[in-house]
Amino acid sequence: MNLKDFYYDLPQDRIAQTPLSDRSSSKLMVLGRKNNTIEHKHFSDILDYINEGDCLVVNNTRVIPARLFGVKEETGAHIEFLLLKRLTDTNWTAMAKPGKRAKVGSIITFGDGELKCRVEKDLEDGLKEISFIYEGIFEEVLDKLGQMPLPPYITEKLDDGERYQTVYSKHRGSAAAPTAGLHFTPELLEKIEAKGAKIAYLTLHVGIGTFRPVKVENILDHKMHSEFYMLDEENCSIINETKKNGGRIISVGTTSTRTLETIADENGVLKPSSGWTDIFIYPGYRFKIVDALITNFHLPESTLLMLVSAFYDREEILKAYNEAVESNYRFFSFGDAMFIQ
């Protein structure tokens, strides 16, 4: 299966640069897998498609201000870091830009010297292992000096950092938001529960996969980077009971989907667990637990588009994407949504 099989033409002006004032007012494209149907709605209409007894599974990760701008002590060169994975209390895996300036042994200072790091190792794919030197609580220092790590295709300034967080974000650790969840408001979630549906929470800290494109022609040669996930006993039971009672598991986002499919056994049963997943879902994959999917519109030739194509059908997805382009849908992180059932 070739990378070009997942290409579609996207005009630059279709990429959403800022979030809408009302989270739930974005467009919603509803795809029916049974009869290959397409409906055009608004996200608040998602309520009409969620039934009593269903379970909405959301990712409650919280984005950290993972982008740091520093100065190399020896030369005064400016270096940008994007924190991706915490290894110990002080050590992280990070992307460095420009990487050639961040040589092993270099000391980089951030702010007025409240935070420093030392480049410890060169890792695969141009990544670095860095160790931080600071006083006090690291999270507080990072909140002061770090910036929200918006994807590179967003060039507008974000006035309110909370708009790149879901309203149910809880566990800090992501380098990017689980963007399908950005459309939900507390009021909409209350209406979903009032209708008799359950809401279950899991955590997957989004990492480098969001920022790295697929570079191989044969997608089977692509290597996914691992991301940390957690599912506790209470939420695990909610999902299992829903499945047992015949309700649908509606996954909010590709991150929730990858976590559920990592944990589920061949019978679609979950156990409380935590760990690292590098699951790569592409056409031909047999889903074990997810029955319906809420997701945003993804980049051409991305692993996220491949996952969505696996859940439905590659040709039907590309047909829907082309219709979305023609219908002036907004794409990517701050863009519109799709519901596949």
Image (cartoon, helix red, strand yellow):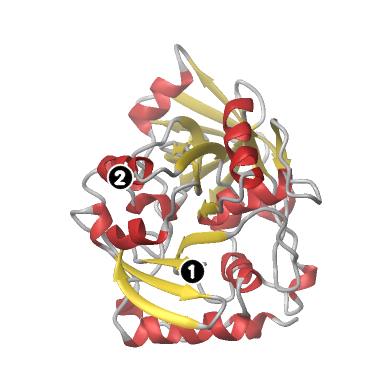
Residue drawn at x 55%, y 48% is: 96
Task: Name the residue beneath numbered marker 2.
Answer: 191
Residue 179 in which image quadrant: bottom left
What is the x, y in percent for residue 53? 50, 46
Rendered-image quadrant of the N terminus: bottom right
Residue drawn at x 51%, y 38% is: 200
Image position of 100 with respect to 83: above or below: below
Q: Name the mark on residue 315.
A: none
Is residue 212 among the parts visible in the rendering?
Answer: yes
Q: Amino acid type of disc 2?
A: Lys
- How busy is the neighbourhood of tag 1: few (under 14 within 10 Å), some, or many (20 plus)? some
Q: Amino acid type of disc 1?
A: His
Q: Name the mark on residue 298.
A: 1
Is residue 155 among the parts visible in the rendering?
Answer: no
* SS type, badge 1: loop
What is the x, y in percent for residue 312? 60, 74
